[in-house]
Image: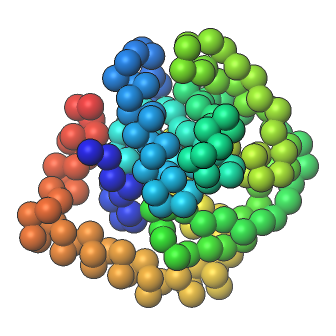
Amino acid sequence: MLKVVKHPHPALRYESRPVSRIDDALRTTIAEMFELMYEHRGIGLAANQVAIPYRFFVLNLTADRERRGEELVFINPEIVKRHSTFEGEEGCLSFPGLYGEVRRARKIKVQAYNLRGEPIEVEAEDLLSRAIQHELDHLAGKLFIDYLDPATLKSFQEKLRDFEREHRAAQTEGALPSDAELKRLLDEA
């Protein structure tokens, strides 16, 4: 069963590998990721946020499972064009309760593959652009907190320490392997 991992789980800093095969197992995983995303009231979820070290993510800007027609899947995505910038608030399912202003490209063009293995090209702006860039950063091991101004990041320190304590407590209790073991599992996946 998939679970959203929280900071400082090593999967969040893991640079994902390209997907080499689109099969029923991947389709099942993606369906589970959508359900998990809806359960957490998110609009996007990257594979490494569920400790899967491969380059794909899911989006539905409505965050509404009843509006499945607006679901988007990006497999092996790459941004091929960026235009202008804007700043806006971001949050992340791996950092529950934290929000900060992040500067992103206002418009982008991204190439990827869909669940049928067909190449797609999406031109996105505003929230869709922001969401794609946020999820793509996850696949590169980058997090939205990496873009925050120093004062905002400093204001997050206590909450980040709480996440760290929760992570270490789960390891001590045996509910979560050590970081070294988690990294090994990512390498072998």
Considering the image in quadrants, where does the C terminus appear?
A: top left
Horizontally, residue 149 falls left or right of residue 39, namely right
User: From the viewer's perspective, is residue 18 above or below residue 34?
Assistant: above
User: From the viewer's perspective, is residue 186 above or below residue 169?
Assistant: above
Q: Residue at x 49, y 43 (%)?
A: 34
- Residue 166 found in image quarter: bottom left
Q: Residue at x 73, y 51 (%)?
A: 130
Q: Is residue 30 visible?
A: yes
Horizontally, residue 117 falls left or right of residue 85, namely left
The image shows residue 119 at horizontal and vertical percentages of 66, 14
Q: Nearer the viewer, residue 66 or 6?
A: 66
Q: Residue at x 49, y 32 (%)?
A: 55
Horizontally, residue 83 falls left or right of residue 24, namely right
The image shows residue 28 at horizontal and vertical percentages of 38, 29
Q: Nearer the viewer, residue 89 or 16?
A: 89
The image shows residue 186 at horizontal and vertical percentages of 28, 39
The image shows residue 164 at horizontal and vertical percentages of 32, 74
Which residue of the protein is positioned furthest toward the front in this rendering?
66
Q: Residue at x 77, y 53 (%)?
A: 127
Considering the image in quadrants, where does the N terminus appear?
A: top left
